[in-house]
């Protein structure tokens, strides 16, 4: 393979003392951001790989680039295997979708490092594994690869670096991905949905989007899955199963598919399918670097270096380096802010440089996308000028969230803190947000918005557009005594980020069990803000201990249907029998029957979210639960309306 004649290496960023390249006047005219991006796109990991792997031994070296189709054939024909020292496959569906988007855009996916195994002793003594063909999520990580016996097998290549990318390509082009269904048992086969990767051939794309320009989605693998769907905005989508591209050997097959599916009038469909075919079958985008050395210890050392040491710069490292070139103290400032938040919240929250820099863009920059171009000299000057205010707002926001009972474990989308920071900044209320005298109505609306976001996974996937729209609403509608919850809900109606809770979704929420994180979110949605001076816990209203002794239950519930209802955990151990209680009240309640504890503490039926005439006695448990389910549903509907 003929390597690039020019290596664009931004010395100030890499920290390399041997300048391979000094920007020309032309490059400087294009700006620092431009030539850094050119370096990333043209070289990426490759130059660093070359430094690590050159002169590894006679016979080692770069081979001619291959197509993705050829790589898939090598995997399918067991010519590419995985050594036992490789870790498990870790990429999720969103990351695989992003990889295919990168392939479609023509972005480089960098070098593969392969060990050409020819020694019979290595084949006998080392364990090698197949690539995963049908991936399934598990509680502790995805299922492992299947062992492949190589004793007596012909020569093959073991993948030392590139496993995650090759496995992702293989799953998208030839395999399936089974995802776990929320609220279902991890131990049952029926709790997983088998999915195949699809590409929308006719929907809108956005080449300028910071995340994905092409809409790749893992969709349920079923004959009943429609090829054409229409979303809530009325936009049509035609879902092409990506694995079908493997059987399309030439462009005639592509055009035949277009004709057979009446897509000839849609230019986008033809363009996207041709582009996908070209990227998979024609373009030589994968560059193998092959190690011929059969010394196992040497190969293990190389593997250790390539998978831990010598890690290439991440995007956040690069952006931070560019910012530091314009403001040398920024690294220390960010580190100090992160330490302060961790300390001030008693280790409840941690933040990183990605979050800080993203927050700056949303709060102070027009463009919120996390790109190199948004951290030039002028933007960094603003960051430096506004740093004290940004630090104060950030610290105040996480102190507020900690006082409201959140921590890293329960705050499932860190970017959800940014619109709250925006509100506090716009209204100037961040100076008192962590105090117990802060407006309780505002606190309640913020907490309800947060819990709806978490329950609906509003911040999953792409967030740039979401943050921009939230910023616009908060800037135009916020007041010191008003958080624009209603305007936010109204703005996102009919979109994929809507806050609507239909009956099926509400029923699923009511079936959440004690201890489930989402159950806490629902209770917080119902409760609103918490008193920062108090500690809260979720607990059973009719005490857990009352349902343990089945013989005792039979004496209370003489009707078989009532007894069956009472012993079912879906009733007594679910959200309908749960409430957030102040810790001191929870301790005093303990195993006391609900009606007695209510009388002792002066609690009325309204406190338990049921009508005034609802009996709290244990013998009326079924009526209480059925009534409370409907009351909770109605309360949630009122909140989101």
Image (spheres, rainbow, N blue to C red):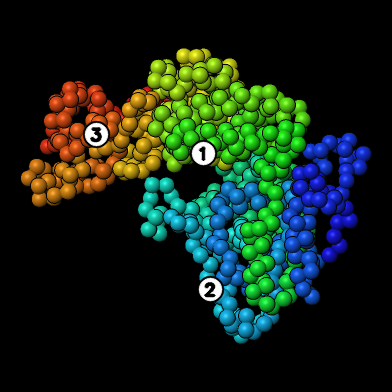
Give the side of residue 464 with respect to residue 10, left or right: left
- Neighbor class of circle 3 (other Cα within 10 Å; few <14, some 14-19, many 20+) is some
Separation (CA) of disc 2 from disc 3: 52 Å
Q: Secondary structure at mark 3?
A: helix
Earlier sequence position, callout 1 versus callout 3: 1
Q: Nearer the viewer, mark 1 or mark 3?
A: 1
Please identify the quadrant where the N terminus is shown: bottom right
> Which residue is label 3 attached to?
586
Q: Position of residue 57 (x, y in %)?
A: 77, 73
Q: Position of residue 415 (x, y in %)?
A: 55, 35
State if disc 3 and disc 1 touch (CB < 8 Å): no
* Picture quadrant where residue 603 is located: top left
Residue at image point 25% right, 46% down: 569
Residue at image point 53% right, 73% down: 147
- Neighbor class of circle 1 (other Cα within 10 Å; few <14, some 14-19, many 20+) is some
The answer to whether 181 is drawn above or below residue 286 in the figure is above
Residue at image point 78% right, 66% down: 54
Residue 47 in view (yes/no)? yes
Give the side of residue 46 with respect to residue 501, left or right: right
> Which residue is label 1 attached to?
350
Depth order, front residue of 556/535: 535
Q: Secondary structure at mark 1?
A: loop
State if disc 1 and disc 2 touch (CB < 8 Å): no
> Which residue is label 2 attached to?
147
Give the side of residue 352 with respect to residue 632, left or right: right
Please identify the quadrant where the C terminus is shown: top left
Separation (CA) of disc 1 from disc 3: 29 Å
Q: Position of residue 97 (x, y in %)?
A: 62, 50
């Amino acid at each position: 393979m003929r390597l690039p004649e020019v290596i664009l290496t931004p010395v100030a960023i890499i920290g390399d003392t041997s300048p391979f390249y000094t920007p020309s006047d032309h490059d400087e005219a294009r700006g620092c951001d431009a030539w850094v991006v050119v370096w990333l796109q043209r070289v990426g990991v490759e130059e660093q790989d070359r430094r690590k792997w050159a002169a590894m031994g006679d016979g080692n070296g770069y081979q001619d680039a291959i197509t993705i189709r050829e790589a898939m054939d090598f995997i399918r024909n067991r010519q590419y295997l995985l050594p036992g020292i490789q870790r498990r496959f870790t990429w999720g569906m969103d990351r695989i979708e992003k990889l295919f988007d990168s392939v479609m855009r023509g972005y480089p996916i960098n070098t593969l490092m392969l060990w050409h195994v020819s020694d019979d002793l290595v084949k006998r003594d080392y364990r090698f594994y197949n690539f995963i063909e049908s991936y399934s999520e598990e509680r502790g990580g995805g299922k492992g690869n299947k062992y492949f016996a190589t004793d007596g097998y012909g020569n093959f290549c073991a993948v030392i670096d590139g496993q995650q990318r090759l496995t992702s390509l293989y799953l998208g082009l030839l395999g399936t991905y089974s995802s776990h269904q929320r609220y279902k048992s991890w131990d049952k086969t029926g709790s997983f949905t088998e999915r195949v990767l699809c590409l929308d051939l006719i929907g809108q794309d956005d080449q300028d989007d910071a995340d994905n320009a092409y809409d790749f989605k893992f969709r349920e693998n079923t004959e009943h899955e429609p090829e054409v769907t229409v979303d809530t905005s009325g936009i049509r989508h035609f879902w092409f199963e990506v694995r079908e591209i493997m059987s399309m050997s030439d462009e005639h097959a592509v055009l035949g598919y277009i004709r057979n599916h009446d897509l000839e009038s849609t230019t986008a469909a033809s363009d996207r399918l041709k582009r996908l075919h070209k990227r998979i079958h024609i373009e030589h985008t994968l560059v193998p670097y092959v190690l011929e050395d059969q010394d196992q210890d040497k190969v293990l050392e190389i593997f250790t270096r390539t998978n831990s040491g010598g890690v290439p710069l991440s995007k956040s490292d690069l952006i931070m380096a560019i910012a530091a070139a314009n403001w040398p103290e920024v690294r220390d400032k960010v580190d100090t802010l992160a330490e302060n938040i961790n300390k001030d919240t008693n280790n409840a929250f941690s933040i990183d440089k990605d979050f800080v820099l993203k927050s700056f863009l949303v709060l102070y920059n027009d463009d919120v996308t996390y790109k190199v171009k948004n951290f030039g000299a002028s933007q960094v000057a603003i960051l430096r000028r506004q740093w004290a205010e940004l630090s104060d707002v950030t610290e105040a926001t996480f102190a507020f969230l900690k006082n409201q009972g959140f921590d890293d474990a329960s705050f499932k989308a860190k970017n959800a803190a940014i619109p709250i920071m925006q509100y506090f900044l716009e209204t100037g209320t961040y100076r008192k947000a962590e105090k117990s005298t802060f407006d309780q109505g505002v606190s309640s609306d913020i907490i309800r918005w947060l819990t709806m976001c978490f329950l609906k996974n509003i911040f999953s996937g792409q967030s740039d557009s979401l943050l921009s729209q939230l910023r616009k609403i908060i800037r135009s509608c916020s007041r010191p005594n008003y958080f624009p919850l209603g305007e936010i809900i109204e703005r996102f109606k009919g979109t994929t980020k809507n806050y609507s809770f239909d009956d099926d979704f509400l029923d699923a929420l009511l079936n959440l069990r004690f201890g489930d994180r989402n159950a806490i979110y629902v209770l917080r949605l119902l409760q609103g803000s918490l008193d920062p001076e108090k500690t809260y816990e979720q607990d059973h209203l009719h005490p857990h201990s009352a349902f343990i002794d089945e013989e005792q239950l039979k004496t209370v519930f003489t009707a078989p249907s009532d007894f069956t209802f009472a012993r079912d955990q879906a009733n007594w151990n679910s959200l309908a029998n749960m409430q957030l209680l102040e810790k001191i009240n929870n301790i005093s309640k303990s195993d006391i029957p609900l009606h007695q504890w209510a009388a002792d503490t002066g609690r009325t039926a309204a406190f338990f979210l049921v009508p005034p005439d609802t009996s709290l006695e244990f013998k009326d448990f079924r009526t209480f639960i059925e009534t409370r389910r409907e009351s909770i549903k109605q309360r949630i509907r009122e909140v989101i309306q």
